[in-house]
Image (cartoon, rainbow, N blue to C red):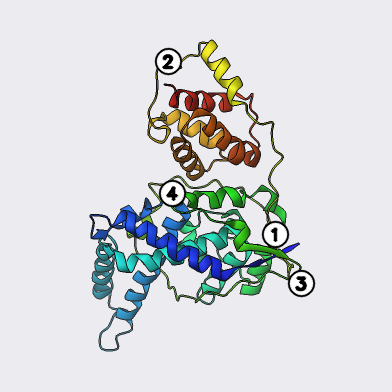
Amino acid sequence: MTVQINSNYLEKYAEEYATIVCERYYSGKQFITGQDIIQLTSSIQVNFFVIKRLFELWQEELNKLKSNPYFDYRDISVHEALTQFMNVLSRRIKVEKGHLQPLVKHALMQSVQVATDPVSFYQKEIDKAPSGKINEYLKENKKYYKWNAQVISFLIDKAGFGHDESAYKRAIAANYQVISENLESVNLLIATLGDVKAFDLDAYLIQNDTPASLEKEPEQEVSNKEESSFFDEVEKDTTPSPETPVKTEIKEEPKAVVTMERPKPSSASSSISASELKHRFSAETYRGMKGVIGELSEGLAINQRFMFTKELFDGNADLLSHALKSIDNCNSFDQAIELINQRYVSELGWEGSSEEVQEFLQLVYRRFLD
């Protein structure tokens, strides 16, 4: 069963999403900086696609200067001065509300596509690469790919690969067929948008018997970056999503037909019982169980955050942060356990008796102690 894209729904949702995000941030503020953009929303992919677009605009500005026919931009002193100027400029990002809103809207639409149809998204990225410089382009932009990066990561850093665009696109499609079952659930990725506005995946992906189609987004010309800048270092303060190395050989063969289908959730584990947990946690003495804790999103120890990210959330710190905030917003322990069962036990295949799950549930229990 294939699905058809409801582009009207996505357009309207993206507009509303961008409006809400900007209204929240600019309440009492006039500008936003690059570092603030990195933390703008709970969806790391949306944030980094905003930065990616700023990088493209930064490159376009540099190209405009170099295209001036009256000055020698190949002169070494001019080149050094221009590089210094552009790097300083990159560290002075200052965006007003009216200019940020379309960037957020565009970033949201790209994020939804990379979550639901990574093959088409990354094939379009190949189209953006300058002729003969696909590897350079992918290496330069890999820091911005936070969702389903495994689909294309095996191609990055393959200097001198020597294949044309069509070969790269076939390789992406073939690699997706190999690793698709290991990619993160679309539902979990899309859930990170819910802190701003719930996204109705069923309204966006309409099941029918016709091939799925996507509207082609305008391409942006991107050229090579020369020296370090804000855009070089933008990924240092974030936890990158883990990548599963996959060896995929690029062969000259007919293009694989890839249809966009809703991923099947992993086998659901038995639901966790809130009443049983309350009975047990109240009757037994656990080390570290004393006292009431504040918000989970603020109170986790570093070692706990690392363990939960690795063992319970498939190494995705973004999903852990979203889960903690969602649980904090619950009104009771019972409601929190219901949310955990619906979103994480079934989607991530949690085993309720495991030590990691039990420690996580203990913290949730303490969060809602009277």
Quarter assignment of residue 157: bottom right
Task: Give above or below for 17 relative to 63.
Answer: above
Question: 339 or 187, which is in the foreground?
Answer: 339
Q: Amino acid at mark 3?
A: Pro
Q: Amino acid at mark 1?
A: Glu
Task: Please tell me whether residue 68 is drawn above or below residue 210 in the rendered image.
Answer: below
Q: Earlier in the sequence, mark 1 or mark 3?
A: 3
The residue that label 2 is drawn on is 290
Taking depth in this image into account, of 309 and 192 the one nearest to the observer is 192
The reply to whether discs 3 and 4 touch (Cβ–Cβ < 8 Å) is no
Q: Amino acid at mark 4?
A: Ser
Closer to the N terminus: mark 3 or mark 2?
Answer: 3
The residues bearing labels 1 and 4 have C-alpha atoms spaced at a distance of 26 Å
Among the two numbered marks 1 and 2 on one chain, the one whose residue lies closer to the N terminus: 1
Tell me the element at label 4. Answer: loop
Q: CA distance from mark 2 to mark 4?
A: 30 Å
Residue 254: image tag? 3
Q: From mark 3 to mark 2, how far is it between C-alphas?
A: 63 Å
Q: Residue at x 63, y 27 (%)?
A: 352
SS class, disc 2: loop
Viewer-nearest residue: 132 or 210: 210
Q: Does the CB distance between marks 1 and 2 fall below 8 Å?
A: no
Q: CA distance from mark 3 to mark 4?
A: 40 Å
Whichever of callouts 1 and 4 sits on the residue coming sooner in the sequence is 4
Residue at 61 percent of width and 35 percent of height: 341
Taking the view exactly as shown, the residue that stands out farthest to the bottom is 70
Which residue is under mark 1?
261
In-front residue for pair 187/61: 187
The residue pinned by badge 4 equals 42
Label 1: state its secondary structure: loop
Mark 2 or 4, nearer chain start: 4
